[in-house]
Amino acid sequence: MRLLGIDIGGTSVKAALVEGECVTTGRSAEYAAPTAATLQRAIADAVPAGAQEAQALGLCVPGRLDPSRKHVAQSINVPGLENLPLVDLVSGAIGIRINPQVTSDAHAAAHDFWTAQRPTGRLLAISIGTGVGASVLDDGRPLHVSGETPGHLGQVDVTLDQNSEPRTLESYLGAKPLRSEFGEGLPEAIAGFHERSKPIRALARAIRIAHAIYRPDTVALLGFIGMQFASCRAVLDAAVRADLTPVAKPHWQLAFGSTPYHAAIGAARLASPSSAERAVEA
């Protein structure tokens, strides 16, 4: 079955065409606060050849969905999405009328990582890109704390300085603050982080909090920025383990994504009828 996944991000669109084990990916040019027309062009640029023959479509969108899941009610980073009928947006871009199965980029990325790596037990997947999102999977099945998610990890208070205003994880680790501080040399800067670097301290604190709440067997960092932390793995691992709650599982592991297309590929796989049936059974 030919499956198409589209991941509309804060700065670009990524897409993946999946047919069995064959995966073809594409990406649009970067944008900022795009209009609806810009988004439609970006989708058209990102989807690989053969997308018009897709039999199912998975779609990741940033922001808060309307209860009908047919449009985005609010999107801070991509305001051009707001109140657009999603089926019209994607159908106009790819040239066929197809109803998308909408999911979060964090869940889709976690699903693809789990499918590829098959970690045992509970997986906490933290996606760091424009913002910070998280998904918790128990042997591949999503944990729902309230509504459709395990919560918004990016909004956890991880204030590092006692005399400063409260700061969230996203304020330390989102793409905008990191690029503002480090510019185009961000990957090299992350590779040089040490135990006192604020992004390391903030991320380690958030992961320690997550250990106390979710008790994961594996913590995986996904997304373009999340994967960069593989270059300072030992520093981050040590920072997390320092003063870690005793309820954390003693043999937990830190892992990293392997592709910036995890969310697009995962969205495609989640759109397959077999995935939808398993979700209903769960």
Image (cartoon, helix red, strand yellow):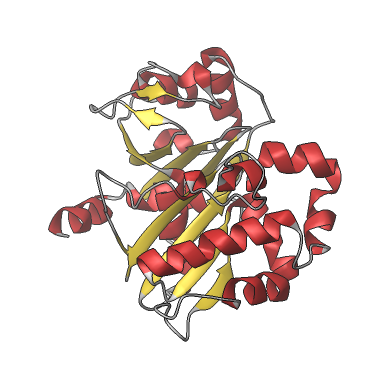
Horizontal arrangement in the rendering, residue 130 relative to residue 157 (left or right): right
Above or below 236: residue 174: above
Horizontal arrangement in the rendering, residue 66 relative to residue 37 (left or right): left
How many numbered marks appear?
Answer: 0
Measured from the top left, where is residue 269 in percent x and y? 38, 53
- Tell me if residue 136 can be seen: yes
Measured from the top left, where is residue 185 in percent x and y? 85, 48
- Tell me if residue 18 can be seen: no
Horizontal arrangement in the rendering, residue 186 relative to residue 158 (left or right): right
Residue at 76% from the left image edge and 63% from the top image edge: 196
In the picture, residue 247 is in which quadrant?
bottom left
Residue at far left of view: 281
Residue at far front of view: 163
Instruction: State which quarter of the image contains the C terminus.
Output: bottom left
Residue at 79% from the left image edge and 66% from the top image edge: 194
Above or below 109: residue 37: above
In the image shown, does 113 or 156 lie closer to the viewer?
A: 156
In the image shown, does 103 or 52 lie closer to the viewer?
A: 103
